[in-house]
Every structure is written in C-alpha cells, then in structure tokens.
Image: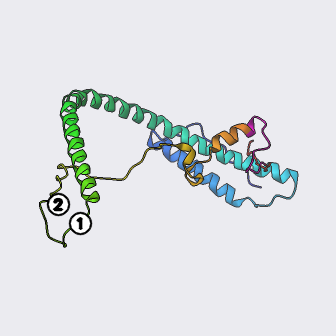
Amino acid sequence: MDTETKPNTDLSLTDSNGRELLQSSLSDYVAFLRRQPAVCGTPEQQETLIKHVAQGHELIKLVAAERLKITRQLDKQKHDWMEIEKEMTAPILAAMQPLKDAVEHYNREVLRVREHQQAQAANQTPITHSGETTWLMPDVALVAKPKGVQMKWTYNIVDPNQVPNGYWIIDEGAIKADIANGVRDIPGVRIYEEAVTTFRK
C-alpha cells in the first residue's frame, strides 16, 4: 500500500497559504484513499483500513477546528450586535406595549359581541320565507371584525387522557437513557444489540 499522508501542522483556514496547504493535504489524502483496495478479509486488513478511515476523520476534525476559529468569533460578534439591538429597541417595545394591549382588549370585546350575535342567529328559527323579515326576527348585521384581525384555528389541551394515541410523541430520549442504564424490556419496544465499528488509530 502507499505511504499514508500525515497532516501538516501549518494547515489553516484563516490565511491563504494555510488554506492552500489544507486543501492540498485533503486532496492528497483523498487520492491516497482512492488508491487503497476496499478489501477487508483479514484482521490485518481490517486494522489497516480502520487506521486509514481514522486518519480521514482526523483531517475532517482539523477542518472543523479551523472553521470554529472563524465562526466562534463571528458568533461572538453576532451576539454582541444582537445585545446592542435589544438595548436600542427595548424602550420602543415597552412604549408600544400599552397601545398593543388596548388594541387587543378592544379586539377581544368586538369578537365577543360578534360571537354572541352569531350564536343568536344560529338559534333563531325562520318563521318567514327566505329574504323576508318581520319585527319578530329582524335581519341584524354582524359586527365587523376589527381591522388587522385574522382568525386562525388553534388549540389547547383540556384533557390529556382523551387525546388519541396518534397525537402522542414517543420519547426516544427516555428510551435510550433507560437502555443505557440497563433496561432490557419495554412493552412495545424491541431492544437489541447492533454492531458499531469505531474507527480509531
């Protein structure tokens, strides 16, 4: 087999020379891997291939580490700017809140009246021909929805015991935690062992 490529300690994403070295090192190792026969029939071959894959993972980690040197600084700058944004906008948000509360209160009251009118109309029994009105059952126009209000369907849980099973989510995290703690029997769950290969040098 070919000689395995070793990572260069000068690899970097933060300067052009280091980035070129990094790309060259990755390209060289890709070429090296492609020259290796994907044959694993003996313990020695298995060990060799694992080492090659592990070295590839090391190069991937190196790229990730170099990327983090850049993105962590960017993340910090982003966080700092978001904090400045919050400080600048907090006063106007606080000043707007009483106005928003007043509008919401008005909207709720108008919608309450509208719902009451709709309920009354639904309970009335027609006593005349369609399109006619009498003093016993006058046509009353519904209060219009407030400007800017859109109706949408939503929900809240009033009795969890009556919610069908199809709406419940399996807590896979809890299952994995119990298995890790030695649980081997959970109703409705097949617990089994599977082979996981660890690629380490």
At a point 70% along the width and 49% down the height, the residue shown is 53
Q: Amino acid at mark 2?
A: Met
Residue extending furthest toward the left: 135
Q: Write down the residue under mark 1.
A: 126
Q: Is residue 56 left or right of residue 179?
A: left
- Residue 118 % position (x, y): 25, 55
Q: Any magenta on residue 118?
A: no
Of callouts 1 and 2, the N-terminal one: 1
Residue at horizontal 28 percent and vertical 57 percent from the top: 123
Q: What colouring method underlies this structural image?
A: rainbow
User: SS at mark 2?
Assistant: loop
Residue type beneath disc 1: Pro
Residue 144 drawn above or below residue 76: below
Q: Main secondary structure of the magenta part?
A: loop
Is residue 83 or residue 128 the one in the foreground?
128
Residue 122 is situated, as x and y percent measured from the top left of the image, at: 28, 59
Determine whether, in the image, residue 144 is placed left or right of residue 76: left
Q: Is residue 72 visible?
A: yes
Check if mark 1's residue and mark 2's residue have beta carbons within 8 Å: yes
Residue 55 lies left or right of residue 168; in this view the side is right
Q: Nearer the viewer, residue 66 or 147?
A: 147
Residue at position x 58%, y 40% in the image: 62
Q: Which residue is mark 2?
A: 137
Q: Residue at x 41, y 35 (%)?
A: 75
- Per the rendered image, the range of residues in magenta is 179-191
